[in-house]
Image: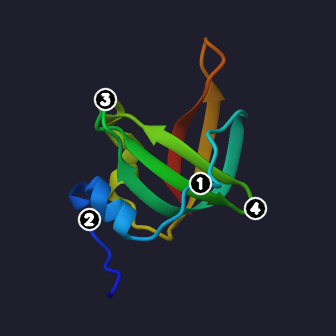
Amino acid sequence: RRQRQMCIRDRSWQEFVDSGFDGRDYEFPDFEGTYEATIACKRWDKNKNLLAYLDFDDGRKIMTSAWSEKNYLGLADIPLNTCVSVSFQFSAKGISYLRSVEVI
């Protein structure tokens, strides 16, 4: 079966599973700062937030959420395999969250 690039807005959970992408090695960030990464995969979660799977240039595999009220930081419209600069920041509760995304 030929793997096709779909608009992220059209990808269902089953299509994500069927794509063969293995997200088991990806972890949520526990740090802050700005890093370069490649978008490996994206999907919607059950709360309609966007989950992005990022391959960092230093080899780390990070999964992060982008929220609808922030227009997903533009991440929904950036194609897979695009190199991006991503910034993470700790919240008041000490949770690292995605602060910005920029295509590089």
State the residue at coordinates (51%, 48%).
Answer: 101
State the residue at coordinates (64%, 44%).
Answer: 27
Tell us which disc is closer to us: 3 or 4: 4
Q: Secondary structure at mark 2?
A: loop
Query: Which quadrant of the structure image shows residue 78?
Result: bottom left
Q: x and y percent of residue 79 in the render?
A: 39, 67
**Labels 2 & 4 near each other (Cβ < 8 A):** no
Question: Quadrant of the image for the C terminus?
Answer: bottom right
Local packing at callout 1 (Cα closer than 10 Å; few below 14, some 14-19, many 20+) is few
Say left or right for 30 vs 80.
right
Residue that numbered label 1 is attached to: 24
Q: Nearer the viewer, residue 97 or 15?
A: 15
Tell us which disc is closer to us: 4 or 1: 1
Mark 2 or 4, nearer chain start:
2
Q: x and y percent of residue 55 in the render?
A: 63, 61
Residue that numbered label 2 is attached to: 7
State the residue at coordinates (59%, 54%).
Answer: 24
Query: Which quadrant of the structure image shows residue 56?
Result: bottom right
Mark 4 or 1, nearer chain start:
1
Q: Secondary structure at mark 1?
A: loop
Say left or right for 66 vs 92.
left
